[in-house]
């Protein structure tokens, strides 16, 4: 009788731990699943006199969408910056990008001989939106501090495949980023950028995609890209793994505890978390569970880095430095344990972590408006090194 009570107690404690471990992300998942999708008349889909294709956004994204567009609208009118918009990087309609730079280009007429001394490093900045929504204009406002007054960098802001509340975007979304890197390789010098000095940045889903590409040197090589040109990753409030084990790291890292709690955690993962991961793993109504779990495995950088390590790759040498940022209040709870796990796999010096003194998942992105923000300061230091 006592043993039975103890077993029940353990199960209750484990279930509570599971819920606490993902409370904010589950809230996001539930908001995504229950929020109505609407082309609200109060939302603008025009930025800089360019009318964009309206997306049926969930209501909780409306404030983020509006503020991002407003900030980018202001940035487009900044005379110290220029933006070449809507450049095609592939054959598909959504494969377009914007190139941001200072008004005074860093290139010179002497670059015809291949000299790169006057070319600026390139920051490829990927927008967020839960893999389902979003626009490249969500990150346009970041160009003010990324490019700097002195043309310290060129910023490339691409669109990529999103699910739009209906379809599975993965792996096309990841492959789009590879296509963007090919475009950078072949064309960015014409815009004053150095294709051998690239930093990949991203917020939320964009940070996840940046990690999926930047932390996988074999993937880059197989795509005809040189992994050595990726000098650093600047990731903001993004998942580094989307398997059940990654969402419940506090439990899964202890084998005895995972043996007890695993079934409960996995049930919670399949019933709730997989719904918000639909644009990555697919929909349960038309995709079998095995395929969904395989997609989650493929889209988990933590899993991939461990696999590469087991295959004998010196991940600490082959993988670029990682700079990870998240809000110190009310951001996704997965941020801290997952980046801690990445530091464990690599080294503390390879993975730098900052808590941004703001409240909320979206505010971690908007903090980049401030030139004194830790993200901008760290970026300037990294750009000076490369």
Image: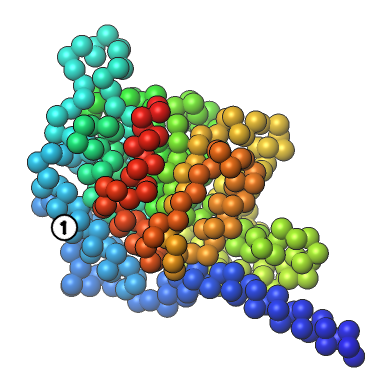
* Relative side of 58 to 315, left or right: left
* Relative side of 327 to 376, left or right: right
Front residue of 238/43: it is: 238
Residue at x-position 26% and y-position 47%: 371
Residue at x-position 65% and y-position 74%: 17
Task: Name the spot of residue 127 as percent of width and height, x first.
Answer: 35, 51
Residue at x-position 52% and y-position 58%: 335
Front residue of 219/375: it is: 375
Task: Name the spot of residue 146 as percent of width and height, x first.
Answer: 28, 41
* Relative side of 60 to 216, left or right: left
Position of the N terminus by quadrant: bottom right
Q: How is the image coloured?
A: rainbow
Task: Name the spot of residue 231 as percent of width and height, x first.
Answer: 45, 31
Residue 298 visible in the current orientation: no
Identify the image quadrant of residue 376.
top left
Identify the image quadrant of residue 336.
bottom right
Front residue of 368/258: it is: 368
Residue position marked by numbered label 1 in the rendering: 46
Position of the C terminus by quadrant: top left
Residue 63 visible in the current orientation: yes
């Amino acid at each position: 009788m006592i043993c039975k009570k103890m077993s029940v107690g353990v199960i209750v404690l484990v279930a509570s731990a599971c819920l606490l471990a993902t409370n904010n992300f589950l809230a996001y998942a539930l908001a995504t699943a229950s929020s109505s999708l609407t082309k609200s008349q109060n939302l603008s889909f025009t930025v800089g006199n360019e009318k964009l294709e309206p997306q049926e956004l969930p209501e909780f994204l409306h404030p983020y969408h509006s503020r991002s567009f407003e900030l980018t609208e202001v940035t487009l009118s900044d005379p110290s910056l220029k933006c070449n918009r809507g450049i095609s990087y592939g054959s598909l309609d959504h494969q377009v990008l914007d190139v941001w730079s200072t008004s005074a280009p860093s290139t010179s007429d002497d670059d015809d001989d291949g000299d790169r001394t006057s070319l600026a490093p390139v920051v490829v900045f990927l927008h967020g939106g839960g893999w389902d929504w979003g626009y490249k204009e969500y990150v346009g406002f970041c160009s003010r501090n990324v490019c700097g007054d002195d043309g310290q960098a060129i910023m490339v802001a691409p669109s990529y495949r999103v699910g739009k509340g209906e379809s599975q975007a993965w792996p096309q979304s990841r492959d789009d980023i590879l296509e963007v890197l090919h475009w950078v390789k072949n064309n960015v010098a014409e815009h004053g950028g150095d294709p051998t000095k690239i930093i990949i940045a991203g917020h939320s889903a964009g940070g996840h995609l940046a990690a999926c590409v930047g932390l996988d040197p074999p993937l880059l090589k197989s795509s005809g890209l040189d992994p050595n040109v990726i000098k650093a990753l600047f990731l903001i409030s993004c998942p580094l793994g989307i398997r059940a084990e990654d969402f419940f790291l506090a439990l899964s890292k202890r084998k005895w505890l995972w043996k007890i709690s695993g079934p409960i955690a996995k049930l919670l993962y399949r019933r709730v978390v997989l719904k918000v991961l639909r644009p990555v793993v697919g929909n349960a109504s038309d995709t079998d569970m095995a395929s969904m779990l395989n997609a989650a495995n493929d889209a988990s950088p933590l899993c991939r880095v461990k696999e590469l390590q087991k295959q004998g790759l010196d991940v600490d040498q082959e993988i670029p430095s990682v700079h990870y940022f998240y809000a110190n209040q009310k951001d996704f709870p997965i941020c801290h344990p997952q980046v801690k796990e990445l530091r464990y796999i690599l080294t503390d010096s390879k993975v730098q972590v900052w808590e941004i003194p703001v409240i909320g998942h979206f505010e971690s992105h908007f903090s980049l408006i401030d030139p004194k923000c830790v993200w901008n300061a760290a970026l300037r230091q990294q750009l000076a090194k490369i």
